[in-house]
């Protein structure tokens, strides 16, 4: 049946001009998990409790495990998880029409993740307890799940009752500004922030059935937001290259699906632009959906119409991996000051390098951020993230050398910033 439909599609559409997905008639906004009220969390608890009773958690966990090898370690990582989270969210919206998956901006918690407000009693809960590491609190406190077998939802932080550091915003800012193709960006994200958060929480979160833990959807909403920021950074938003599900990635690739989680045969090209096709949402801290589909009549990625933003100031809101927009001007100004060579500024932060200097504020460095302890707060220098573990690398079949190279590069950037005047505003 599927191959018949695929042939019909090939006949109907000339090979070079793909059909653009239609504009959404309504859109909802995904908010930062850090900004939710206790009432927002209670509503989330209501929705997900119903979803568990209806078997959706088991279904999403089973599908993620079954499709695991097709949707990690290749550029398929992005469209698959975009569509997967959206499918889950759509089910929740049938229970509560205002439901939206919050995104967890994990850079806000990166240096001491266990102290995150997202990991408290009234939110996602904290660490697992007892020999089985069962999660006692939070919106999934005391949950039992059915996949892969009947068990309590487990959390097992990777450093006792705390966690190893994740990835700071500045490293992500560099990726979204400087990676000039999606394949490279995928490696940076998947081998970095993506893995660090899964591994930090541990328990179900660091297995193939991680969707048992609601954190999965909030973390992947954030990864999706970062992809959208990248797409808004003067790159070709429709760029989809590198390894795909089966050979070179193509917008015509069917997003991997199965009987548990069925995307109706959607292709990668259907989910590239927020506000079009099935992806009818935006983020409270990222650029809006474009009013027209990028490059509607153009298959040429060098066509300026393909960029969501031309080289204007409007895309500056997509410069930073941090959703804390109050820090953006300071991040930009301090990085400009810290990267004393124009070449390294251009290499690591080409967006900032290209900014007109009238756009740059004078960096204010409050004394307490210069290392003085008088206000009770040490300088916010950056720390290295924890590396990927061998267990994680093997489970995904990643190339350990490539993962190590990405890690060393991230540490190198952190060292450069740390050795300079730079202090993080986040
Ligand atoms: C992506 O960019 C990197 C760095 O410039 C380059 O090494 C790599 O070959 C590119 N990949 C593809 C698939 O174009
Ligand atoms: C970008 O610039 C080109 C050429 O100046 C213009 O034709 C096009 O409409 C612009 N696109 C957007 C999305 O602003
Ligand atoms: C960065 O500098 C701070 C303060 O000088 C230091 O405590 C920290 O260990 C450094 N981080 C790295 C990754 O070197
Ligand atoms: C940062 O400073 C340390 C200690 O002074 C030095 O060993 C290291 O090479 C520097 N790293 C970079 C990237 O500048
Ligand atoms: Cu996954």
Image (cartoon, rainbow, N blue to C red):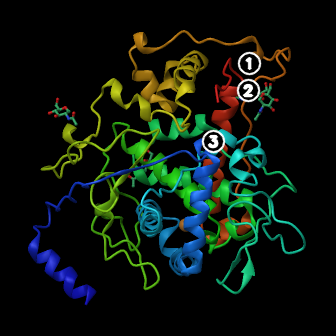
| Mark seen at residue 369 | 1
Q: Which residue is mark 3?
A: 107
x, y percent for residue 244 = 40, 67
Mark 1, secondary structure of its residue: helix
Identity of the residue drawn at 21% across and 80% down? 6
Quadrant of the drawing holding the C terminus: top right
Dot 2 or dot 1, earlier in sequence: 1
Contact? badges 3 and 1 (CB < 8 Å): no
Residue 382 left/right relative to 295? right
Residue 33 left/right relative to 206? left
Vertical placement of residue 70 versus 349, above or below: below
Contact? badges 2 and 1 (CB < 8 Å): yes
Vertical placement of residue 43 versus 396, above or below: above
Pick the residue in front: 342 or 187. Answer: 187
Mark 1 within 8 Å of ligand 3, using the beta carbon: no
Identity of the residue drawn at 31% across and 71% down? 266
Where residue 76 sits, quadrant-wise, is bottom left
Identity of the residue drawn at 68% across and 23% down? 423
x, y percent for residue 322 = 56, 36
């Amino acid at each position: 049946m599927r191959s018949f439909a695929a042939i019909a599609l090939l006949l109907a559409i000339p090979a070079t001009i793909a059909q653009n997905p239609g504009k959404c008639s309504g859109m909802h906004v995904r908010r930062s998990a850090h900004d939710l009220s206790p009432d927002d969390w209670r509503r989330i608890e209501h929705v997900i409790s119903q979803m568990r009773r209806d078997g959706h958690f088991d279904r999403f966990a089973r599908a993620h495990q079954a499709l695991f090898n097709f949707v990690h370690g290749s550029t398929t990582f992005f469209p698959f998880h975009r569509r997967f989270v959206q499918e889950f969210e759509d089910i929740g919206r049938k229970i509560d029409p205002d439901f939206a998956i919050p995104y967890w901006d994990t850079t806000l918690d990166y240096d001491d993740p266990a102290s995150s407000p997202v990991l408290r009693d009234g939110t996602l809960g904290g660490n697992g307890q007892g020999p089985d590491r069962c999660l006692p609190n939070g919106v999934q406190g005391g949950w039992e799940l059915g996949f892969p077998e009947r068990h309590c939802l487990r959390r097992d932080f990777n450093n006792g009752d705390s966690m190893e550091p994740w990835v700071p915003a500045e490293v992500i800012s560099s990726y979204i500004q400087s990676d000039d193709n999606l394949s490279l960006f995928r490696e940076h994200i998947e081998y970095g922030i993506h893995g660090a958060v899964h591994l930090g929480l541990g328990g179900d979160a660091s297995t193939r059935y991680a969707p048992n833990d609601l954190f999965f959807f909030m973390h992947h909403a954030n990864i999706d937001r970062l992809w959208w920021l990248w797409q808004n950074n003067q790159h070709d938003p429709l760029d989809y290259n590198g390894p795909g599900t089966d050979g070179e990635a193509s917008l015509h690739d069917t997003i991997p699906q199965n009987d548990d989680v069925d995307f109706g045969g959607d292709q990668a090209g259907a989910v590239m632009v927020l506000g079009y096709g099935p992806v009818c949402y935006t983020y409270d801290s990222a650029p809006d959906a474009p009013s027209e589909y990028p490059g509607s009549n153009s298959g040429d990625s060098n066509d300026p119409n393909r960029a969501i933003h031309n080289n204007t100031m409007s895309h500056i809101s997509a410069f930073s991996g941090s959703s804390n927009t109050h820090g953006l001007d300071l991040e930009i100004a301090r990085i400009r000051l810290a990267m004393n060579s124009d070449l390294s500024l251009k290499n690591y932060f080409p967006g900032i390098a290209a900014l007109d200097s009238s756009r740059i504020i004078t960096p204010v460095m409050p004394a307490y951020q210069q290392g003085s302890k008088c206000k009770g707060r040490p300088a916010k220098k950056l720390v290295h993230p924890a590396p990927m573990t061998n267990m994680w690398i093997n489970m995904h079949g990643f190339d350990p050398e490539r993962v190590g190279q990405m890690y060393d590069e991230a540490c190198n950037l952190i060292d450069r910033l740390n050795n300079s005047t730079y202090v993080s505003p986040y």
